[in-house]
């Protein structure tokens, strides 16, 4: 067999594999959307759930998902940004940074169930935070931090060293160069990373089951005092998210329309994550264009 | 006799164990252009970067010897690298404007230093861009991204950016080697305009360029300064055999 036919066979094989992956993905997405989208309605998206009767919605779970996501991002983004800037812009290559990098690597490959159980033992039990939004947000932070740190570090890496030299040679301090040249230049790519990790956080269930809890108490959307138990803003209330809801219905749902609600919820989740992904691409590209072109 | 603004004495630089500069003694008078020439890898960039302490950024670099800027030791423990780099600016081989507007690029140094007066900033932008001979080409789109400009325009904006912080010395490391001939000659014209007001030190591998613009030329080889003299002496009547071989294209 000559190298040309070999090459052809190899390329054909790779195309085949790639095609198979795409096909599986499309089939999965198609199945979820086809079975889920017909369940969607304004009522489904906004109404509270019903435990025993049919006709419940996922309004509270949907709201909880977003609230948890925002809290988790508010906590993890500044830490991840600081860690990434330190690691990439300041840290020397020595055993300390190697250790930190390895730790991040390991953290990012921890199964999320483990993160969830750790969150349960530490935040829920030890720190007496109970099943609450706050416990959930901390658990999500642990889950998110390593991934976000690495993605921000990668964003910094895309900014060429000639930019750093340009800043320093202009008499900017290291800090000024980082904050006034490098970070602004990296914003589009950092933003893309943040949104993509938001998608992952949004769909996360295992880390939340034992931290944010599996119940969704009714919320009073007119009460914005975070100290009231029925206030949507209260961070100490248990809060089942959409992803947890799907898991719960499928394992112990007793409402007559459990199957339909599960399909509908899955569709909402998938659509939300797709939207995150498209938003990430779109915003990243647009911002980059605005920064770089006429 | 003119003042010597920058002096280097017995300058050695090691990258790890590797000696890249082997005892350089070279002084610069105020104003005018000095070109540093020599085969690639001979230490021109390394030498240039010691002059505004850009080598500090590279790990495992050891520097011995003395560099004095207006009599002050650049490597004294009390020396402020940030201040030094304001007075000794640098332009790189690859044009490296920030991914912001032309206007922002030029005033970046000043703005970060705290200058807020809009009129003053406007004036500095115009003056610097004029000095860098790029004003006419960019004056109508100052608020568009500098990355949309051609390479040659970008490089002149980078020169303007350096001029805006009013340095005394401008270091340029092969500033035209990434540019087309037309852009290159525009940069050369720009430098010729600036030579009356600034001390300019330019690394170039283009011998014609050195002979066209430099008042003085220094020839480096293997980490050593072989010869430095008025440019026309270096090209017409070099004292050293190695210089002559290099000038006449026998190597490098
Ligand atoms: N960061 C570095 N680390 C190690 N060696 C280097 C580094 N930069 C340059 N060198 C070496 O130092 C010598 C001089 O390089 P350089 O100053 O860039 O030469 P030139 O600018 O004259 O081409 C070369 O042998 C080069 O390989
Ligand atoms: Mg060089």
Image (cartoon, coloured by chain):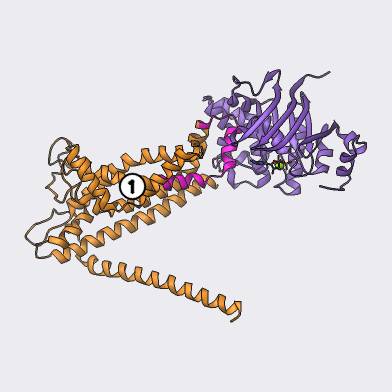
Chain colours: A orange, B purple
Front position in the image: A233 or A113: A113
The single residue placed furthest to the front in the displayed view is B17
The kind of secondary structure the magenta stretch mainly shows is helix
Image quadrant, ligand 2: top right
Seen at 64% across and 37% down, the residue is: B16
Q: Determine the chain carrying the residue at label 1.
A: A
Question: For this view, does A37 lie left or right of residue A175?
Answer: left
Q: Is residue A168 highlighted in magenta?
A: yes
The verdict on label 1 being within 8 Å of ligand 1 is: no
The answer to whether A223 is drawn above or below residue A63 in the figure is above
The residue identified by callout 1 is A144
Magenta segment = A148-174
Q: Viewed as shown, does residue A58 lie left or right of B47?
A: left
Q: Quadrant of the N terminus of chain A?
A: bottom right
Residue B113 sits inside the magenta stretch: no
Q: Is residue A131 above or below residue B21?
A: below
| Residue visible at 26% across and 67% down in the picture | A32
Provide residue B192's location: percent of width, then percent of height.
78, 34
- The picture places residue A238, in percent across and down from the top left corner, at 16, 45
The answer to whether A150 appears left or right of A48 in the picture is: right
């Amino acid at each position: 067999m000559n190298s040309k036919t070999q090459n052809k066979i190899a390329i054909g094989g790779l195309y085949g594999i790639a095609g198979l992956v795409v096909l599986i993905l499309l089939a999965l997405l198609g199945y979820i959307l086809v079975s889920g989208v017909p369940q969607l309605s304004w009522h489904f998206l906004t109404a509270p759930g019903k435990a025993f009767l049919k006709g419940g919605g996922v309004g509270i779970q949907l709201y909880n998902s977003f609230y948890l996501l925002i809290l988790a991002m508010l906590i993890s983004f500044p830490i991840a940004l600081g860690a990434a800037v330190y690691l990439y812009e300041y840290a020397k290559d020595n055993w300390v940074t190697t250790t930190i990098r390895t730790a991040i690597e390991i953290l990012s490959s921890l199964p999320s169930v483990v993160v969830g159980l750790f969150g349960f033992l530490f935040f829920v039990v030890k720190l007496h935070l109970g099943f609450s939004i706050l416990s959930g947000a901390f658990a999500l932070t642990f889950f998110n931090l390593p991934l976000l740190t690495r993605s921000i570090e990668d964003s910094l890496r895309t900014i060429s060293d000639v930019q750093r030299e340009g800043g320093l040679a202009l008499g900017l301090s290291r800090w000024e160069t980082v904050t006034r040249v490098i970070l602004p230049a990296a914003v589009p790519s950092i933003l893309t990373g943040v949104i993509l990790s938001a998608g992952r956080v949004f769909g996360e269930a295992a880390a939340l089951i034992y931290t944010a809890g599996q119940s969704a108490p009714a919320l009073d959307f007119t009460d914005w005092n975070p100290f009231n138990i029925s206030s949507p803003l209260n961070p100490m209330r248990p809060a089942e998210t959409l992803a947890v809801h799907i898991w719960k219905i499928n394992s112990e749902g007793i409402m007559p329309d459990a199957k339909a609600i599960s399909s509908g919820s899955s569709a909402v989740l998938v659509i939300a994550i797709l939207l995150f992904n498209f938003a990430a691409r779109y915003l990243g590209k647009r911002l980059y264009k605005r920064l770089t072109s006429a | 006799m003119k003042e010597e603004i920058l002096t280097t004495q017995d300058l050695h630089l090691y990258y790890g164990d590797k000696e890249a500069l082997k005892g350089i003694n070279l002084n610069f008078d105020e104003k005018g252009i000095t070109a540093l020439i020599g085969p690639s890898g001979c230490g021109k960039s390394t030498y240039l970067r010691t002059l505004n302490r850009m080598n500090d950024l590279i790990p495992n670099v050891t520097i011995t010897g003395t560099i004095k800027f207006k009599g002050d030791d650049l490597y004294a423990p009390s020396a402020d690298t940030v201040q030094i780099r304001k007075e000794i600016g640098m332009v790189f081989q690859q044009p490296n404007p920030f991914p912001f507007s032309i206007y922002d690029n030029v005033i970046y140094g000043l703005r970060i230093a705290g200058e807020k007066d809009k009129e003053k900033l406007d004036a500095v932008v115009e003056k610097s861009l004029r000095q860098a001979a790029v004003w006419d080409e960019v004056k109508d789109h100052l608020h568009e991204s500098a990355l949309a400009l051609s390479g040659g325009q970008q490089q002149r904006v980078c020169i303007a950016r350096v001029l805006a912080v009013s340095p005394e010395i401008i270091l340029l490391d092969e500033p035209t080697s990434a540019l087309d001939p037309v852009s290159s000659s525009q940069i050369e014209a720009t430098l010729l305009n600036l030579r009356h007001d600034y001390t300019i030190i330019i690394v170039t591998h283009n011998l014609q360029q050195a002979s066209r613009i430099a008042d003085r030329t220094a020839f480096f080889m293997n980490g050593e300064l072989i010869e430095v003299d008025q440019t026309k002496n270096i090209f017409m009547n070099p004292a050293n055999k190695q210089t002559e071989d290099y000038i006449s294209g026998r190597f490098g």
